[in-house]
Amino acid sequence: MNALLTGIVPPLVTPLTDRDTLDVAGFERLIERLILGGVGGLFVLGTTGEGPSLSYRLRREVVSVACRVAKGRVPVLVGITDTAFVESVELAKHSAEVGADALVAAPPYYLPEGQPELIEYIRHLLPELPLPFFLYNMPSLTKVSFEVETVRALMDDPKVHGIKDSSGNMTYFHRLCGLARGREVWSILMGPEELLLDAVLAGGHGGVNGGANVFPELYVALHGAAVAGDLVRARALHAMVMEVSTRLYQVGRHSSAIIKGIKCALSIEGVCDDFMAEPFHRFRDEERGRVEGVLPELKEQISALVS
């Protein structure tokens, strides 16, 4: 992780067969599918991976399996976000022991902290971490944002290698790009895939995009076209990303629908189980039938674009 992290780093779903059992074979198939699709890294135990909903034992297993299967072919990033400082550190140590490459954490998400407290928290955390670290800005779920001045205060620490921004605020993202300009190893990655094209054109380095679990080639192609300045191709690929967002993520009615849609599609494709961590439930028959209806058309359209 001494190089700039770029490209598509999918936030992997965590395939489950019940509340506390990893679908190991499905997870292995998913990882191989993503690496074959040309991704630049793997991010486990993030929001899409339902990380905070998993037991500590299961989180460690997820990291171990991911590192074993990746075999150093792409970097493995591990989400260590937690309300308990000690548990974040323990998972970080385990991640280093099994071969992970970097760590990622959002602000602790129960009692909201002020920005001075957040800076102090990260400065206490960094000396305990055995791997490079990425900030994770996810204010919709954590209630607290890494404000621009907070990022400025933390980015000079040599352990901090970048930020994943899932705020959806492009003004904020542009300001992050301004902070990082001229730095050799400081990556800015976009979370919402609907903003991936805008993010790369603004100076971002890639995306942590959930849809890449299902269609890795689409997001890799969009990133590549944007970096190359091929705006005609990039816009066509972006339009396809918007189709995925509209037709797959809006099948369900709740905020969990994105993860449910991704897991459902992977299940239909025969990649892995679609069991959801509590308190959520996989799509029922009606929603699954709708995904089965749209998936072949999406696959055909994407294949025509990226071939």
Image: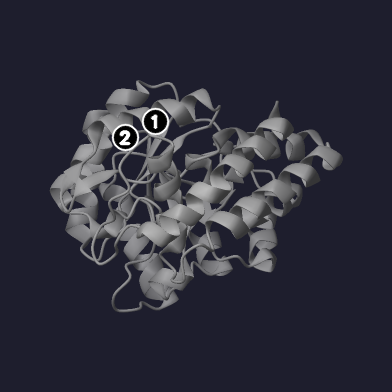
In-front residue for pair 152/290: 290
In-front residue for pair 193/17: 17
Residue beneath disc 2: 27
Q: Quadrant of residue 84?
A: bottom left
Helix, strand or loop for disc 1: helix
Task: Provide residue 171's location: percent of width, then percent of height.
Answer: 69, 67
Residue beneath disc 1: 31
Q: Are marks 2 and 1 in contact (CB under 8 Å)?
A: yes
* Tag 1: amino acid: Ile
Q: In this rendering, is residue 264 above or below 287?
A: above
* Tag 2: amino acid: Phe
Q: Quadrant of residue 132?
A: top left
Q: Residues within 10 Å of mark 2 (few under 14, many from 20)?
A: many
Task: Provide residue 259's location: percent of width, then percent of height.
Answer: 42, 56
Residue reaching furthest to the right = 232
Tell me the quadrant of the picture where the C terminus can be found: top right
Q: Residues within 10 Å of mark 1 (few under 14, many from 20)?
A: many
Label disc, if present, on residue 301 of the rendered structure = none
- Its colouring scheme is one colour
**Looking at the image, which residue is at 38% across and 52% down?**
46
